[in-house]
Image (tube, rainbow, N blue to C red):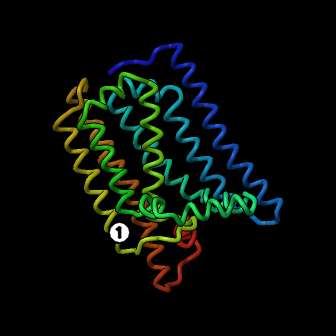
Amino acid sequence: MHSHGGNGLLSLDTMLGLAVLGVASLYLAGTVVTRRRGRPWRRMRTASWLLGVGTIGVVMIGPLAVAAHESFPAHMLGHLLAGMVAPLFLVAGTPVTLALRALDSRQARVLSRLLRSRPARTVAHPVTAAIINVGSLWLLYRTPLAEVMFSSAFVHSLITVHFVLAGYLFVASLVGQDPNPHRASFPVRAGALVAALAGHSILAKYLVAHPPSGTTAAEAEVGGMLMYYGGDIADAVLIIVLCLQWYRAAGKRLTPVTARLADG
C-alpha cells in the first residue's frame, strides 16, 4: 500500500469537500424551491440524503481516506460505506422526484424524456445495474487497477465515486421510489438481488484466498470478512424493503412502521 502525498492530499481534500458541500446544497436548494411552490417535502427524505452525502464525505476526506491507502481493511470499510451504505440513504432521499418538482416545466420535461430514453431504460434495469455493481468489483480486484488505485489518491477518489454511482443505480433499480417508467417486475428484481449477493460473497472469499498485490494474508482476511458480513447486512436491508414493497403491491395492508420502510 502507498500513502498520500501531503500537499496533493490537501488540494484533493479541498476539491472533494467542495463537491460534497455542493451536492448537499443543491438538494437543500431544491427542497426550498419545492416548499415555496406549496408542495411539501418530507424531512426524512432530506435527512436521508444528507446522511448519504455525509457518509461519502467521511469515506473520501480525512483519516479514513488516508488509512484506505495504507490498510486493506480500511479500504474495504470505505468501500462498504461508499458503495453499499451511502446509496441506501441517497435512494431514500428520492432526488429525481425532488428535481422534477424543483425544476421549471421545460427542464422537468427534458429530465422526464431522459428517464424514458432507451439508454436510461437499459442502465436502470436491475440486471444491468447488478452487472455494473458487482462486475466492476471483480474487474478492480482481478486486474492491476487495484494497485494503481492504492498508489494514487486521485484514482482512488474516482473509483470511490464510481462505486457510489454504481451502488445508487443498483439500489434504485431494486427499491427506489423515484419515477421509473420502465421498472422491472418484482421477480426480476429479486433475482438480480440474489445474483448480486452471490457474486459479492464469492468475491469476498476469493480475496481471502488471493490477496491483492501488496496486501498481507492477515489484512486480506479481515478485509474479506468486512466485505462478506458487511455486504450481508446491507443486502438484508434491501431484501426487507423489497419484500415489503412486494407485499404491499400485492394489495396487503402494512403497519405504519413497515409502510415507512417500504417507502424508503
In percent of the image, x 20 and y 38: which residue is there?
208
Residue nearest the viewer, comparing 115 with 34: 115
Q: Is residue 115 left or right of residue 210?
A: right
* Three-letter amino acid code at the position of disc 1: Ala
> Where 105 falls versus 64 (above or below)?
below
Q: Work out whether residue 26 or residue 55 is closer to the camera in this orientation and state it.
A: 26
Q: Quadrant of the N terminus?
A: top left
Work out whether residue 81 can be spotted.
Answer: no
The answer to which image quadrant residue 143 occupies is top left
* Callout 1 secondary element: helix
Return the x and y of residue 214 as percentages of the image width and height. 25, 23
In the depicted structure, whether residue 184 falls above or below residue 12: below
| Side of 241 where 200 appears, left or right | left
Name the side, left or right, on which 112 lies relative to 243.
right
Where does the C terminus fall, quadrant-wise?
Answer: bottom right
Which residue shows up at 23% across the image and 30% down it?
A: 218
Q: Can the viewer see residue 157 in this picture? A: yes
Q: From the top left corner, tell me how far across and down residue 220 is, in percent.
A: 25, 33
| Residue 127 vs residue 25, the one in the foreground | 127
Question: What residue occupies the far left of the structure in this picture?
Answer: 209
Give the residue drawn at x 34%, y 33%: 73
Give me the residue at 35% from left, 69% from top: 190
Disc 1 residue crowd, few under 14, some 14–19, many 20+, Cα 10 Å: some
Residue sticking out furthest to the bottom: 251
Answer with the quarter of the image where residue 221 lies: top left
Label 1 belongs to which residue?
190
Residue 12 image offset from top left, x and y in percent: 54, 24
Quarter-wise, where is residue 149 in the image? Answer: top left
